[in-house]
Image (cartoon, rainbow, N blue to C red):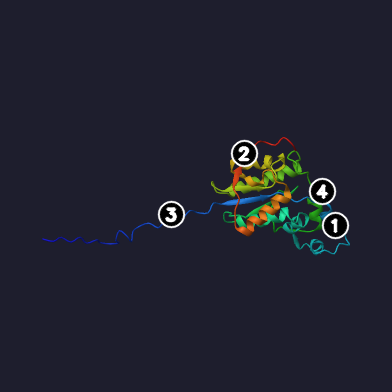
Amino acid sequence: MEKTVTFRGNSPAAGAREPFRKQPKEQVFLLSPAHLKGKRAERLRQNESRSEISVRLRTGGATIADLFCFASPLYFRGKLAYAREFGMPPPGLEPCYVITSCRGLLPPDTRIDLASLDELASGGAVDPDDDKYRIPLERDARILQAKLGDAASVILLGSIATRKYAEPLASVFGARLLFPSDFSGRGNMSRGSLLIRCVREGRELGYVSVAGLPRAREK
């Protein structure tokens, strides 16, 4: 007698699982600030200045990103473009935050005016021994840390040759604080060009933990 087998419900093929899809890794970038005591930034304070950003600063219509991109046309602009391209923040957070001299971490679209420019330019020294700089930075870093998932990374786009960024940030973020390995041995102009090129090519850099790098001895 010939036997037949009947499957009830879904067939084995229909119940097969879909291929595993790797979830994007959450990451937030921290951008070192532009120098606000140089000639380019100083021109913004002059009443006779008719540049677009000077006018916007007088009316409170500029952002901290506008200000720092003006003061650092290549390096900061490259950092901002790269962070916005490759940042993958958890819900409710920005792809990147800007380190400031006295106001901790600010979203790049934070509105500023001339009074804010004066505050940032004359605020604390960007030095972990200066409380005006360190205390707001560590405060905002702890707030950010509390909102990040366990696997999220924080990537510093700035120098680690001195203590000014790595020391206060590593004290909060520990091993999750990363740094682009291709930044080593490059100056600011070279880093800016590299970041802009990466954005154009859609190529993300590799990162290493700041905690595993030699500690800087300089301030």
Does the residue at mark 4 contact the one at mark 1 (Cβ under 8 Å)? no
- Residue 180 visible (yes or no): no
Q: What residue is drawn where x is 63% and y is 38%?
A: 213
Residue 15: image location, x then y, percent: 33, 59
Dot 3: element: loop
- Residue 210 visible (yes or no): yes
Examine the image and state in which quarter residue 167 appears: top right
User: Dividing the image into 4 quarters, which one contains the C terminus?
Assistant: top right
Instruction: Name the residue beneath numbered marker 3.
Output: 20
Instruction: Name the residue beneath numbered marker 2.
Output: 211
Instruction: Name the residue beneath numbered marker 1.
Output: 43
| CA gap, disc 4 and disc 1 | 15 Å
Q: Amino acid at mark 2?
A: Ala
Residue 86: image location, x then y, percent: 60, 55
Instruction: Name the residue beneath numbered marker 4.
Output: 122
Q: Amino acid at mark 4?
A: Ser
**Alpha-carbon neighbours of circle 3 within 10 Å: few (<14), some, or many (≥20)?**
few
